[in-house]
Amino acid sequence: MSRREFDVIIIGGGHHGLTLAAYLARAKVDACILEGRNEWGGALYTGEVTAPGFCHNIHANFMEFLHVMPFFSDFDLPSLGARTIYPEVQAGIAFKDGRPPVLMYRNDMIEGTAQSFARYSKNDASTWRDLKTKANQLELLMAAGLYTPPPKLKPGEPPPNPFPAFCSSFSMFGLDEELGYKSIKDCVDELFEADEIRALLYRVGIEFAGPALEWPGSAYFFLFGCILMPGCWRMIVGGTHRLSGAMVTACLKEGVTMRESSRVQRILIDGGRASGVILQDGTKLLARKAVVSAIGLKDTFLDLVGEDHLSPYYRRRVKNFKDGPDQVLGSLAMALHEPPRYKSARHDPGMDRAWYQIVGYDSAKEVLNYCRAGHVGRIPDLPAAGVWVNSLWDRTQAPEGRHSLTGWYFFPRASDLTEAQWEEVRETYNDRFLRLFAEFAPNMTRENVMADFLHTPLDQERGMRMREGDFGHGAMTVDQLMGLRPFAGCAHHATEIPGLYLAGSCTHPGGGVTAACGYNCFKVLCEDFGFEPAWRNSRRFY
């Protein structure tokens, strides 16, 4: 590495770090981004983990924010290789006895979802039609909330109370404001009466790092996870790694200095200010303006900065930042001869074409008990899952005439089981799932599976550096959201150490492929250093 000094050094080459780097370079800031692994994109990972030619998105799959993501349009990522497909049937749940499935369609196909709901409840169909219509109208307002940094607290100012915002959100949907204090389950049960529909909404409601179904104060995730997000999910042609590839290309086009296999050992603090980094190989890099960490909160402060540089308040808050949720992802992958053929599809063939297929549950109670298992540190007895078969829409993701299935189990945290126990899960759980799967889709026997793979929370912790396998990069609970994420005194991206900023998913709005954490950090850097506000766009108000 020839150059050793830059305006801004970014630690971590996940999608937030890439976003920040590209905007900084567009603003004519000399930026260098460092990635410890030999590939970019973090959880935007696609691998041939089962057999050659079968592509599996082992972590991030559902691109629910691309249509509102500033980075995606500002840098014209489709022209750089990030092409999308927008499946009509977004999600569906099938049943063992072959009764009709419950399907959720795209945002522009509200009536399709209403008709599917009406098979079980006309009241639920009407409720969905009303809520989803309002959600579509409020989508840009939601986007503005995602892509705006929380206000900076003034000295002595009390931490923000999130509940007024939650309650007013319910009011905007024409619902009782007191729902804002309740749980996801409370909201689903109060607003929807059919058990089959509740089962679908329970699973969808916690799918994207949401808090536990029964936690009071988690109701905001009912609006966000059950109503706003389903219906806008896109997939990336060729696998989600094509999105990170497009982001890398955007960075290179803008002139970002990019260094992979460059793991940071320590953030340099000189005179109380962040001045650069030291890599594991001893290389010293200096930052004229700022060092920005786009990795985890504890990784940043406990591993790279060191407790001796932290105030008692920061030390306490960082150590007590909660990993979560209690149920984390185990990723399964299977190379198939043919895609699943569900019994329930005889009533509606859309089930076989649903992008997200929820299988293994016959009631809302079974979903609830499945999700409860993680809270007591055990593997669910019912080996149910949510799966997707991307090769149904994108033939590049499997060999001709074959199909690639990938999906998610919900498991306890990595530390809840020993390494030997996780190895047993790897060896047995997919077989248990297949035995259950065949009761819902008779062709899903071991004979239909050419090869399979299971990626545990322990694997995620070691490979993707997600503590405990936490795909939310910090619990998405009410005490760690918006102006309280990661904590009140550190929610505006700047930290108590001058020159040190945060841009990872530990900041607002949290986990998910939003590119918002890097985008919001760039806004703050523009404010603090007078950089050119390259984020501004006359066609967008956020």
Image: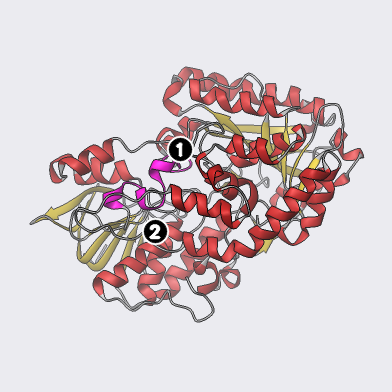
Q: How many marks?
A: 2
Q: Amino acid at mark 2?
A: Gly
Q: Is residue 281 left or right of residue 111?
A: left
Residue 234 point in image, percent of width and height: 65, 57
Labels 2 and 1: the sequence-earlier one: 2
Per the rendering, the mark at residue 470 is 1
- Quadrant of residue 274 within the rendered picture: bottom left
Question: In the image, which residues are magenta?
Answer: 471-490
Depth check, front residue: 23 or 147: 147
Residue 378 point in image, percent of width and height: 52, 19
Q: Is residue 335 magenta?
A: no
Q: Is residue 476 magenta?
A: yes
Residue 271 point in image, percent of width and height: 7, 57
In the picture of the structure, the residue carrying the numbered disc 2 is 17
Residue, x 35% and y 48% (percent of image)? 484
Residue, x 26% and y 58% (percent of image)? 494
Residue 360, above or below 519: above
Placement of the N terminus among the 4 image quadrants = bottom left
Residue, x 70% and y 59% (percent of image)? 133
Residue 132 point in image, percent of width and height: 69, 55
Which SS class for mark 2? helix
- Quadrant of residue 292 within the rendered picture: bottom left
Badge 1: residue crowd in 10 Å (few <14, some 14–19, many ≥20):
many
